Amino acid sequence: MAGPHDTSENAAVASSPRRTPRPDKTHIGTHALKPSTLMMGHGYDPDLSEGALKPPIFLTSTFTFPSAADGKRHFEGITGKRPGGAAGLVYSRFNGPNQEILEDRLSLWDGAEDALTFSSGMTAICILMMAFVSQGDVIVHSGPLYAASEGFVAKVLSKFGVTYVDFPAGASRAEMDAVLERAKDQAARQGGKVAMIYLESPANPTNALVDIEAMQAARDSVLSPDCPIAIDNTFLGPLWQRPLQHGADIVVYSLTKYVGGHSDLVAGSIAGAKRWMDPVRALRNTMGGIVDPNTAWMLLRSLETVELRMQRAGENAAKICAFLKDHPKVERLGYLGQISDPRQQDIYNRHCNGAGSTFSLFIEGGEAEAFRFLDNLVIAKLAVSLGGTETLASLPAAMTHLSVPDERKAALGITDNLVRISIGIEDADDLIADFDQALAKV
């Protein structure tokens, strides 16, 4: 890698003195190593950190420059005078060793050119959208979205002259063409452009899938490839769905969920080609919002077991949903392993590698019956969030999506009896016994 006083262009290859340069050791001969293997060391050289097997936590606000020329070159990258961002460590609002190692490893799961990390999933979403919109622009988004995402578009961006057009998650190609034409006309009337197509698939909390491939084809036909397609892949990523392989340009995660996986941190990320990441990086440099070093270190720990945890949780969910499917107190399930709609099954077959472990459980009755079920759970915890090692249950209509207007919730299928379940890694039989006794109290 570049030496500590190397001011040549080659020095930009290694953007941190605690990391190995790209390309890293991602192959043994012609054999490409899997992400689950690379999570153990990719992007980090122990020899540059006193031989420490794991990266230390770098708690510093600023970094010294090897030379004045290095400092100038770094700030040329940060300020946009030279493309590509800082060629080295500058200041912890911009970058840091723990964050850069984390971003390198996150990019591997989705096969992305670059990745950026943030202090929360919503910080990632807000800065992403703000980086691409201007006054008069239109955002096209699927529905439902996580309530805070939908609220940011409808209530915050609208203050700055940005409008939106939405469509249901299960829309056909023809419906997508129509909604993009409508958005294009709306943007023209406002003197703007269609700035972004923002998807959430599976949707929170209904598990409805969006046809990413159809949306890419519609975008290319009606608009142009210069309008990015971003997708929140939190429910299935990074193990069970790889949206960049199916036409998305940017993949978004709440790292709080499956990637963090222990319900002990809050963080977010986006990943994609550098052409999409660079504008977001520039705005993050200005606004802040980068994940802190300690949380980045914890996420590096979590990435080592994310595949194992998600596999176990997915296996548990399949067993539990098989039990719940015909239970007399269960109206129906919104579980990707038991899809009844042919259109949704087709999308699942093309896009997904697994059914995940978060699903919707519709209790016979309404809010009172759902409350009774939730209040009688013993193992499963009554809490929002998902993707942790423990099983969680909540009532979106009364909790995470309470701020969504009632008519909007009704249109999106977010009913008073929809319980969102995130299955953890406990024993599946114990969880079945817990759900059985709680349903008996309904």
Image: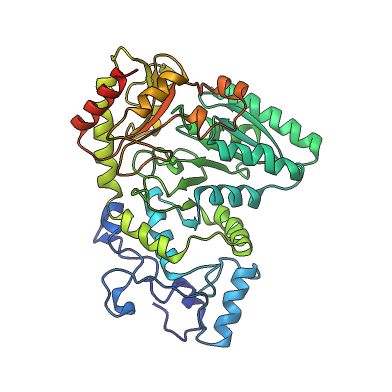
Give the x, y percent position of residue 70.
55, 82
Q: Is residue 425 visible?
A: yes
Using the image as rendered, state which of residue 324 and residue 375 is in the foreground: 375
Give the x, y percent position of residue 419.
41, 26
Vertical side of 171 occupied by 155: above or below: below
Q: Is residue 345 visible?
A: no
The part of the image, by quadrant, that contains residue 74 is bottom right
Vertical side of 305 occupied by 347: above or below: above
The part of the image, by quadrant, that contains residue 279 is bottom right
Give the x, y percent position of residue 203.
48, 31
Give the x, y percent position of residue 421.
37, 31
Quadrant placement of the N terminus: bottom left
| Residue name at image x 75 percent, y 32 percent | 186
Left/right of residue 361 with respect to residue 171 in the rendered view: left
Using the image as rendered, state which of residue 387 and residue 66 is in the foreground: 387
Using the image as rendered, state which of residue 185 and residue 122 is in the foreground: 122
| Residue name at image x 20 percent, y 32 percent | 430
Left/right of residue 161 with respect to residue 71 in the rendered view: right
Outermost residue toward the top in this view? 328
Quadrant placement of the C terminus: top left
| Residue name at image x 26 percent, y 27 percent | 320
Left/right of residue 113 with respect to residue 223 in the rendered view: left
